Image (tube, rainbow, N blue to C red):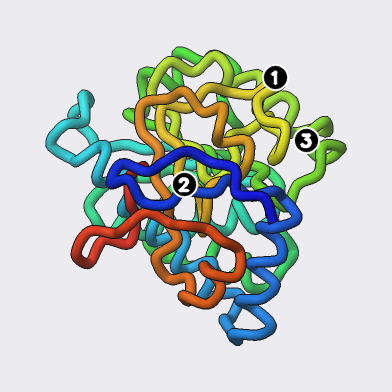
Amino acid sequence: MSNSGFETKDGQEPLRYISKQEAEAVETELLEDYRFGKQQFIEILGHSCAMAVTKVYPLKTLPKKQPTVLIICGSEENGAIGLVCARNLRTYDYEPTIFYPKKSLDNLYKDFTIQCEKMDIPFLSYLPTEVQLINDAYNLVVDAVLGIEANSEEGNKEPWVTILGIMKQIKIPIISLDIPSGWDVDAGNTEGISPEVLISLTAPKRCAIQFSGKRHFVAGRFLPYDIQKKFELNLPKYSETDCVVEI
């Protein structure tokens, strides 16, 4: 197993940037061998993403009077993580709005949707094509669109093509969950967006080597030590009880 990566801040072994195949193997092992539930896995990651947002953009630092955040969700796992992130942000007194244009038929993802609805989180019926409306209404955008499970063909279909075109024009900060929209998991940024913040889930993917935004976090503290060792992840040290760490 190759050990490509960059040295971490405290001089420990280089952090690995894993391939799509390795990331899928880590998740499979968690779900099948370690008996993590799918809901549990998504819940941990969604909560971690919300915590990262609060670290970079505390309520008191948001430029608008209302602490509004737009979360754009895809139909697969990354979108479900976005739903959980939105629900957690709501409990931290942010005002999330969700755009979820292609709702999943998965019962678990339906449950996450209902939870958000029950917490009075609004859902947009469409994404404004006039980008200035988005810039004026929200402080931040959370990109939870395609993620690692989406193949390139899915990304080239509607509504994702139109959404990506709109997101490329957004001027307010974008926080991408795991894989910035339009990026290839392994090859990186071809025609994708340029987020200000990236939150890598479990471990950074190879595409993250090309990330040139302001801040990059990893949400993988929950990973059992034996999995970290097996995949030579060399995750950075987490501070005290933090569930995310900046790299």
Q: Quadrant of the C terminus?
A: top left
Judge depth for marks 1 and 2 and give the one in front. 2
Dot 3 and dot 2 residues touching (CB under 8 Å): no
Left or right position of 180 against 21: left
Q: Considering depth in this image, is 136 or 235 the residue closer to the camera? A: 235
Q: Earlier in the sequence, mark 1 or mark 3?
A: 3
Q: Which of marks 3 and 2 is in front?
A: 2
Q: Which of marks 1 and 2 is nearer the N terminus?
A: 2
Badge 1 vs badge 2, beta-carbon distance below 8 Å:
no
In the rendered structure, find residue 14 and report the number of the disc placed on it.
2
Which of the 4 image quadrants contains residue 188? top right
- Please tell me the numbered disc located at residue 191: 1
Expressed as whole percent of the image width and height from the top left, the position of residue 24 reads 71, 61
- Looking at the rendered structure, the secondary structure element under dot 1 is loop
Vertical arrangement, residue 218 with respect to residue 42, above or below: above
Which residue is depicted at the point 33% across and 62% down? Answer: 243
Q: Where is residue 239 in the image (x, y as percent from the top left)?
A: 22, 59
Q: Which residue is more in the foreground, 117 or 52? A: 52
Residue 155, disc: 3
- The image quarter containing residue 208 is top right
The mark that comes first in sequence, 3 or 2, is 2
Q: Which amino acid does label 2 sit on?
A: Pro
Q: Where is residue 121 in the image (x, y as percent from the top left)?
A: 41, 52
